[in-house]
Image (tube, rainbow, N blue to C red):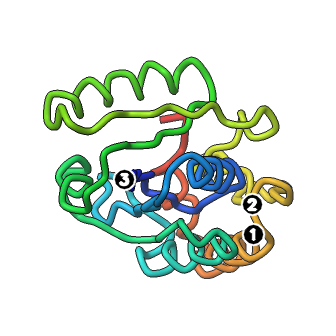
Amino acid sequence: MTIAIYPGSFDPIHYGHIDIAKRAAALFDKVLWAVYDRPLKNVMFSTAERIGFMREAAKGTPNIEVVSYDSLTVEFARRMGAKVMVRGLRMTFDFEVEYQTALNNREQAEDIETVLLFTSLKYAFVSSSTLKEVAFAGGRIDGLVPPYIESALRKRLAQLGDDRGDKIKQVSLQE
């Protein structure tokens, strides 16, 4: 049985993430869709909320298991018996980042392979940071995220009120 891990902060998930997770599930016996519980960036949604979003998205795909972890990704993968790490690629910038990460992971764990899946063209421009910024500015994000994510994101922005600019700025692509 080949177990793959698809790790990330997923704050929040979007259709590009869901596309990669489901395509990975078609390639591997089991996919651990793994939320990193200690990202270096500020997040809008708790680990429990992100897990809930991902479980909803994974319904109907029985070989996807949503989990969280708070250790080095390769250590978590090894502990879970995963031999493959799945990553999604949108643009050339992603390749450079993922290549560097894959080399670092190879140094840490030679027995774990990295598999890069190209994002479907219609999601090539979508990132969690960008969609949060668009939502903050009042723009449309339907078609980028499932309706339950859009609702949760708009609700969270309303809860943040005047503080929302500072929160969004911390994850802005413009920094």
Residue that numbered label 2 is attached to = 145
Is residue 46 found left or right of 15 in the rendered image? left
Looking at marks 1 and 3 on the same chain, the residue that comes earlier in the sequence is marked by: 3
Q: Position of residue 106 (x, y in %)?
A: 22, 29
* Mark 2, other Cα within 10 Å: few <14 / some 14–19 / many ≥20: many
Residue that numbered label 1 is attached to = 150
Residue that numbered label 3 is attached to = 41
How far apart are the alpha carbons under marks 3 and 2?
A: 21 Å
Looking at marks 3 and 2 on the same chain, the residue that comes earlier in the sequence is marked by: 3
Mark 2 and mark 1 residues within 8 Å of each other at the beta carbon? yes
Residue drawn at point x = 70 percent, y = 71 percent = 149
* Mark 3, other Cα within 10 Å: few <14 / some 14–19 / many ≥20: few
In the depicted structure, whether residue 117 falls above or below residue 75:
above
How far apart are the alpha carbons under marks 2 and 1?
A: 6 Å
How far apart are the alpha carbons under marks 1 and 3?
A: 21 Å
Residue drawn at point x = 48 percent, y = 39 percent = 87
